[in-house]
Amino acid sequence: METAEQTLARVVASRLKELETNAFAVEKAAGLPVDAVRSILRGGKKSGTTLNRAKDVCDALGLEIYIGPTRDVAGIDQPPAADPEEFARIPLHNASLAAGNGHQNGSEMIVDYLSFRRDWLRRIGVAPANATLARVEGDSMHPSIWSGDIVLIDRSRTDVPVRKIGSKPRNSSPVYALLDDGHARVKRIERPTDDQVLLLSDNPDHGPEFAKIETLSIIGKVMWWGHTSRE
């Protein structure tokens, strides 16, 4: 029979594999003490797995910790698992894209997955292998993209085409996720010349910004966003 330490070690190891990350990355991203997760994986009696420490680690991995009478969940209807032939699981990273001055991410650990229909992804021209998800922080892309919204990024689309700025409204320009001096941002981009780009916000309170294309690193083109429900 497994000890409590062995059970916890097994569950944590399984979750790390599912999230495609490692103990060191989780400790760093969650601000946990050095060896907090690794000591649990070793499963020893001196692993420091107090209730508080175990809860901190489970919270960082999106696991539930429960002590109490056995809970009967047999009567609860569970939704069927998504058919992998019809749905692609797209990773949601622990990274924020600032709709503003920029957000510096300390980690890009995968924290969850969302399922998207493969035929819908094909329709918008996104290969599942190139797709990734992140959250937006800030108000500069209001009312199109709100703080807390999730965006779907096509990482294969990193080239911003050169085109003359016409009379079209600025909210018709494509939206990109980008790194600007190491800070992750989400902006509409116009590229009137080979070396110059214009970063545009949908919120009129935020003016346009000029930048050199060589100073930016394009993460990918934003192909979809989902609004967070608000009261």
Image (cartoon, rainbow, N blue to C red):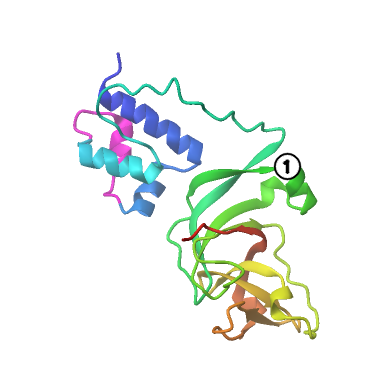
**Residue situated furthest front in the rendering:** 231
Return the residue at label 1.
Answer: 118
Q: Residue at x 63, y 33 (%)?
A: 82
In-image side of 74 versus 140 (left or right)? left
Q: Is residue 53 above or below residue 160?
A: above
Q: Residue at x 66, y 78 (%)?
A: 213
Q: Secondary structure at mark 1?
A: helix
As rendered, which of 83 and 78 lies closer to the eye? 78
Confirm whether the magenta stretch covers residue 119. Answer: no
Q: Residue at x 71, y 32 (%)?
A: 85
As rendered, which of 190 and 116 lies closer to the eye? 116
Name the spot of residue 153 as percent of width and height, x first: 64, 58
**What is the tally of numbered marks visible in this picture?**
1
In-image side of 54 versus 20 (left or right)? left
Q: Is residue 96 above or below residue 69?
A: below
As rendered, which of 5 and 66 lies closer to the eye? 66
Name the spot of residue 70 as percent of width and height, x first: 30, 21
Confirm whether the magenta stretch covers residue 36. Answer: yes
Q: Is residue 46 above or below residue 229?
A: above
Name the spot of residue 50 as percent of width and height, x first: 20, 37
In-image side of 119 versus 67 (left or right)? right
Name the spot of residue 27 as percent of width and height, x first: 34, 48
Instruction: Categorize mark 1 by other alpha carbons within 10 Å: few (<14), some (14-19), many (20+).
Output: some
In-image side of 90 versus 36 (left or right)? right
Q: Tell me the quarter of the picture where residue 171 sits.
A: bottom right
Q: Is residue 83 above or below residue 226?
A: above
The stretch in magenta equals 32-48
Q: Residue at x 66, y 62 (%)?
A: 222
Q: Inspect the image, locate mark 1, and give the three-letter code of the amino acid beneath it.
A: Arg
Viewport quadrant of the N terminus: top left
As rendered, which of 97 and 178 lies closer to the eye? 97
